[in-house]
Structure formats: structure tokens, C-alpha cells
Image (tube, helix red, strand yellow):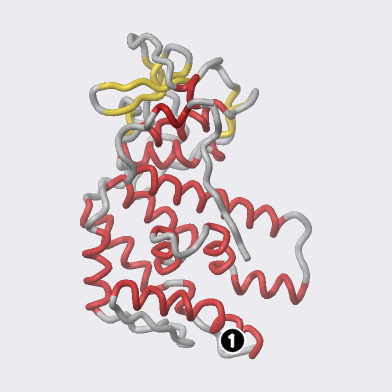
Amino acid sequence: MWRFCLRLRGRERCLLNRPPRDSTISVRPGPAPQAPARAYVPPTERKRFYQNVSISQGEGGFEINLDHRKLKTPQAKLFTVPSEALAIAVATEWDSQQDTIKFYTMHLTTLCNTSLDNPTQRNKDQLIRATVKFLDTDTICYRVEEPETLVELQKNEWDPVIEWAEKRYGVEIGSSTSIMGPSIPTKTKDVLTSHLASYNMWALQGIEFVVTQLKSMVLTLGLVDLHLTVEQAVLLSRLEEEYQIQKWGNIEWAHDYELQELRARTAAGTLFIRLCLENTTVKHKLLQD
């Protein structure tokens, strides 16, 4: 009953123009990292100072250009992404800004900055361990004992996702009503650790980002494997809150805002993961009108 589709805006042709390559600009959607910060926190807003956005291919990948100046990361590194599709998506974020640049809406840019600068200075193994650790507190593994209607709702909505994950990866996950949560077997963690090791560092940054949004590794795996849509995963992660809203009513504008924000962040993270796994270049014939 939920449907979701991720689309790039139709501005790719103008984005592929290559401007001169002799100047740079450090536009930083986020302050310089301070340990132990998990990732960059974008500033609020800034007046738009550029007219045109384009991408160009450099030695290290694809670059973003604001007018004739190159975008840089908060640590003053050249903003370079591994795939043309991701570069187009990031450029679309910058091109869609109006009179004011709202950095807090530019999730793809922030994720790229995190991948390029690695503010937490973690290697691949550390990033995987941090992601797998979320399984111990996975939202859909914690169950209530009452009221009966919520117990039944959790069973009907969450159990099928856990069963899918267990079958898909050949592991045991389970659920529990204990405040300590279910006891996740070591074998399960080992299998999922091995699975995550097959992803590159960029995709892993996106996976951890989505896990932190949904508070669920199981739902994130469902998203990455295309078993769930973004809207399904978000609503499943908010199951108890949505139950309370239906029972007691909605707080004017607040709940809707939180829901839309979560959808936006989760959608951006999911798109980021997919684009980090795409081929390096886009077939240009697909970009024609």
C-alpha cells in the first residue's frame, strides 16, 4: 500500500557542461569536525552566491562546480565523488536551492563530505562493527507486552520483516519483550559483518546513516535489498508512534514535520547507497530530453 520512487531531476544536460578548471571554492555545509562527532552538522542557511551548477570529470572522479569554482569539503579537500550519477544528484541539490542555501536539506552533500573527510577517522572494519552493533538495540526487535492491540500490530507488521531477514541471510534474530532486548547470536553478527564487508566505504557510510535514522539494521537491510520501500521502512520504524497518534490524535504540524523529515533523510541515504554502487559513468543517451 505504500509506494516510493527515487528520481533525479531533469537537469542533467546543463550539469554536464565543463567549466574552466583553474579555481576552487570551499563551500562547507558543516563546521570543521570535532572528535568525537559522528558526522558533520550542516549550518542553517546562507545566501545563494552562485548562478550555475555543473559537474566535470577530474583525475579522482567527478567534481561539482559552482559557476567556475570547484566545491570543497569542510576540511578543504576537493569535493570529488566516485560516480557521475552521484555527482548529478549532488549538483541537483545545489541547483535546486533558491535565494537562500538551506544546507540542512542537502543530505547527499553532507554524506559525501562525511565520506571524503571521514571526521570520525574510522576504517572499514570499525565502520562495519559500529553498524552491526545497532542490531543489539534494533527497534523492531523490542516488543511491548500491552496493550493487546499494539502487541498484535507489532507482530503483524514487524515479524514478517524479521522472518525475511532471517531467511535472506540464513541467521537468527528474533524479538523480545525484555528491556534488554533479544540475545543476538554471535553467528548472526558474523554473517552480517561479512555481508557488509562486501560494500565499499562510501556505501557503508550511507548504510550507517540510514540505520541511525530508522534505529534499525533489519529495516535498513530491507531497504538496501529492495525488499522494502522508503515509506514502508519509515512507517515501520515509527509503528508505536503512529499507533499512539491514531489513538490520541496528532500534535498540530509537529508529527507531520517529523515524518516528512525522516522520509527525506532516509530517502537520501538510500539513494546515496544505490548511487555509490552504480557504475562510474552515466549513459549520456539516457539524459536526452
| On-image quarter of the N terminus | bottom right
Name the residue located 70 percent from the left edge and 56 percent from the top edge.
256
Q: Position of residue 6 (x, y in %)?
A: 52, 46
Question: Which image quadrant is residue 134 in?
Answer: bottom left
Is 269 displayed left or right of 95 in the figure? Answer: left
Q: Position of residue 178 (x, y in %)?
A: 45, 87
14 shown above or below 118: above
Is 240 displayed left or right of 166 in the figure? Answer: right
Q: Position of residue 125 (x, y in %)?
A: 21, 57
| On-image quarter of the C terminus | top right
Q: Amino acid at mark 1?
A: Val
Q: Nearer the viewer, residue 250 or 277?
A: 277
Question: Which image quadrant is residue 242 in?
Answer: bottom right
Name the residue located 47 percent from the left edge and 33 percent from the top edge.
29
Q: Position of residue 253 (x, y in %)?
A: 75, 54
Q: Nearer the viewer, residue 270 or 229?
A: 229
- Crowd around label 1: few <14 · some 14–19 · many ≥20 (10 Å): some
Is 90 displayed left or right of 278 in the figure? Answer: right
What is the count of numbered marks?
Answer: 1
193 shown above or below 5: below
Name the residue located 61 percent from the left edge and 81 percent from the top edge.
153
Q: Which residue is mark 1?
A: 151
SS at circle 1? helix
Name the residue located 41 percent from the left edge and 79 percent from the top edge.
163
